[in-house]
Amino acid sequence: MIKNDSKPTVISIKNLKKSFGSLKVLDGVNLNIKLGENLAVLGKSGSGKSVLIKIISGLLKPDAGTVEVLGLEVDKISTKELRTLRSKIGFSFQNSALYDSMTVRENLAFPLIRNKTDLSKSEIQHAIEEVLNQVGLPQTISQMPSELSGGQRKRIGIARTLILKPEIMLYDEPTAGLDPITSSEINSLIKKVQTQYKTSSIIITHDLTCAKNTADNVAILVNGKFLQSGSFEEVFKSENEIAQSFYEYNFINEK
């Protein structure tokens, strides 16, 4: 469904289905994401966007279909293999998911201590300083999450995923609850991550400005399937009524 090129596929999903009781959330999803590609997945609340990335990261099991990430079928691999795979996937949660009782330094050190047991204290400190510089917040290293703004918490949450140098990034509503200026800063950071870390990403969002500024391709999830996909211009300059209503709802005015 998404345009192919010569780059290798890092995420391949075929006929993915997932229900909760009688509620069909995903009903035959097909998806390919190439190396270095950013894909924005759009859809209304409850359309299955977050369920999709939870299945990709192995947090939920599919009812049917195949989900391959970096060449591994996620629900068929061992617990050890899944743990190794997850270390290559950065998951940026909507609420940033920082530990309130830890400083920024301790929040960033935690995944390294857990996953890179051979690192020295000086190596961990260097990695923390490096990633804080990447997200533009070196001055926050000793602060508590409660002392940070919403935008800063988002940045630190992204930094915590970047510290393991992931190959894939999964962003869940990265601009939700942020003012337009801070949203623009987060959008710029997502593009910076794509360029500097060579990541492939799925960006779950309601925000068309975010989708337009961060994604190479977009896909609209409706009734458990991708209704429309392609570049932002292809999707929203089409005559598809659902795509047009989604566009109009977001009040984007191009000049």
Image (cartoon, rainbow, N blue to C red):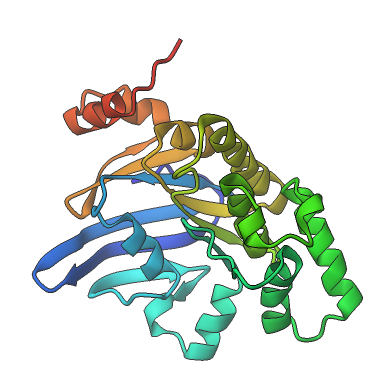
Q: Residue at x 32, y 77 (%)?
A: 61
In x, y percent, where is residue 212? Answer: 47, 32
Q: Residue furthest front?
A: 147
In x, y percent, where is residue 98? Answer: 58, 65
Q: Residue furthest top?
A: 255
Q: Is residue 89 visible?
A: yes
Between 195 and 153, the one lying in front of the other is: 153
Q: Is residue 49 above or below residue 234?
A: below
Q: Residue at x 18, y 69 (%)?
A: 19
Q: Quadrant of residue 237?
A: top left
Q: Residue at x 20, y 28 (%)?
A: 240
Between 144 and 72, the one lying in front of the other is: 144
Between 242 and 147, the one lying in front of the other is: 147
What is the number of callouts on the image?
0
In x, y percent, where is residue 37? Answer: 53, 47
Q: Residue furthest left?
A: 22
Q: Residue furthest right?
A: 122
Q: Quadrant of residue 26?
A: bottom left
Q: Is residue 122 toward the left or the right of residue 251 in the image?
A: right
Q: Is residue 231 visible?
A: no
Q: Is residue 37 above or below residue 250?
A: below
In x, y percent, where is residue 152? Answer: 64, 49
Q: Is residue 68 above or below residue 203?
A: below
Q: Is residue 132 toward the left or the right of residue 26 in the image?
A: right
Q: Is residue 172 toward the left or the right of residue 242 in the image?
A: right
Between 236 and 129, the one lying in front of the other is: 129
Q: Is residue 185 above or below residue 196?
A: above
